Amino acid sequence: MNSASTVTAIAGVIQRDAVLTYNLLKLANSALYQRSYELHSTVQAITMLGLDFVFRWVTLLVLAGNQNCPSGYLDYALQRARTCELIASFVGCQRSEAYFVGLLSALDSMFDMPMVEIIEPLPLGVEIKSALLAREGKLGVVLDAVTAYESGQFDTVLRTGINVPVLQKAFWEAVEYANTMLATLASVTTHP
């Protein structure tokens, strides 16, 4: 599937949800992205924002729409996802996969369910499932390092081969990222 057909396919999925479509167009047309023209379609918005960015925003919008999610857990999930992304290169992982694993790793807390019940039914790659369920593979190392850092287990962090100062810097960058994402979400999300 080429890039244009991928964008069209993703736009088709997003367009099935009116609130998602509305919020995506509102974000793309917001003051954050100063342009001389307005965007009028999800295809234009996806093309302008980029697939990775749209994936993050759609995921954020869906999670934010979950009424059962305890307050603060979305912030926690975004921080973990971004921290995983920022340290991915230290173990040779793709940044987008590390972000995804970090985000999914918080779902058990967000939904108050065992991780295996959430992950097993999903059509995820073996590497992602192994990282989430058994902390195996390179993605498992990234997740292990981040969760160990979050709980102050610095000896475990060191065993992953990632330096504590590297994780500390990534963590604080992730805090800023989560704050920015949530502030932007609050400013652009409105239900029609």
Image (spheres, grey):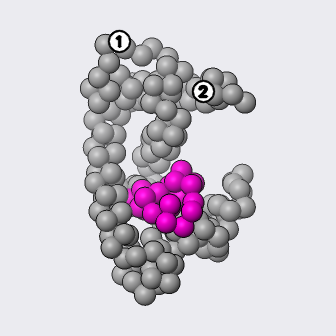
Q: Is residue 35 magenta?
A: no
**Part of the protein shown in magenta:** 79-100
What residue do we see at 35% from left, 34% from top? 189
What residue do we see at 27% from left, 26% from top? 31
Residue 166 at x, y percent in the picture: 36, 69
Amino acid type at mark 2: Val
Of the numbered discs 2 and 1, the one sitting upstream in the chain is 2
Residue 93 at x, y percent in the picture: 57, 60
Look at mark 1 in the image and give the residue it sits on: 37
Look at mark 2 in the image and give the residue it sits on: 7
Are the two marked residues, 2 and 1, in contact with CB atoms closer than 8 angstroms? no
Q: Is residue 92 magenta?
A: yes
Counting every numbered tag in the picture gives 2
What residue do we see at 67% from left, 24% from top? 5
| Left or right: residue 43 compared with residue 170 | right
State whether residue 83 appears in this view: yes
Residue 167 at x, y percent in the picture: 38, 70
Please name the predominant secondary structure of the magenta segment in the image. helix
**SS for callout 1:** loop
Amino acid type at mark 1: Tyr
> Few, some or many C-alpha atoms within 10 Å of disc 2 (few <14, some 14-19, many ≥20)?
some
State whether residue 9 appears in this view: no
Residue 48 at x, y percent in the picture: 45, 25
